[in-house]
Amino acid sequence: MLSVANESSAERLLAVPGMMRVPSPRIEMFILRDFLSEAECAALIARIERQRRPSTLADANGDTAFRTSETCDLPMDEADVAALDARFSALSGIDRPFGEPIQGQRYDVGQEFKAHTDFFAPDGVDYARYCSVAGQRTWTFMVYLNTVEAGGATRFKVIDKTIQPERGKLVCWNNRRPNGSCNAATLHHAMKVRKGLKYVITKWYREKPYL
């Protein structure tokens, strides 16, 4: 039977040159600068600009200003996107079938994504819709594509950690506790951009193959 890998680990990530762990006992979170080059970031920004659409929200809470960014679904069948996906897989150690398609996000001045978690709330109205086939989200890998002129930081309030958007910087975290339950300490806020634009790409992984 062919073995598959659907899990990353601190040991694997810390073996990557330049990878740093955020010092908190409440979350597995890591930062790697210059994961993407200036040229790679520019190409992804251009793609997001061409294909962006209003972002959506799972378990809508009635707050129309909760998530005001725009989103781009990267075409996973194109060679450059497939190569990027393979890089995420090589970094994380998680086989590609367990990953969602890579998304791009664009934030204009005043846009934000208020405090949220990437895992789907087990008691949420859309939980079955999103998790019935591929299961819960496990790891998040996010890369800033530009250095924002002002604002746009990602704030993890529970652990009192604010990460500044810098071109090419990768941030990743485990959305679960050691016992496998959802980790509320991963609550994070994509704060308002004050000047300029902000671009990121995000790769999420699941418990089971994503179809």
Image: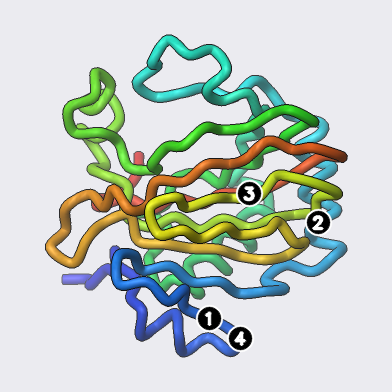
Q: Nearer the viewer, mark 3 or mark 1?
A: 1
* Neighbour tally class for label 3: few under 14, some 14-19, many 20 plus, Cα within 10 Å: many
Q: Nearer the viewer, mark 3 or mark 4?
A: 4
Looking at marks 3 and 1 on the same chain, the residue that comes earlier in the sequence is marked by: 1
Q: Is residue 98 above or below residue 199?
A: below
Quadrant of residue 83 in the image? bottom right
Q: Nearer the viewer, mark 3 or mark 2?
A: 2
Amino acid bearing label 3: Ile
Quadrant of residue 119 in the image? top left
| The label number, if any, that marks residue 18 in the structure image | 4
Q: Confirm or deny contact between disc 3 and disc 1 (CB under 8 A).
A: no
Looking at marks 1 and 2 on the same chain, the residue that comes earlier in the sequence is marked by: 1
Q: Is residue 108 above or below residue 10?
A: above
| The label number, if any, that marks residue 20 in the structure image | 1
**Mark 2 lies on residue:** 147
Looking at marks 4 and 2 on the same chain, the residue that comes earlier in the sequence is marked by: 4
Amino acid bearing label 1: Met
Q: CA distance from mark 3 to mark 2?
A: 14 Å
| The label number, if any, that marks residue 201 in the structure image | 3
Q: Nearer the viewer, residue 122 or 7?
A: 122
Q: CA distance from mark 1 to mark 4?
A: 6 Å
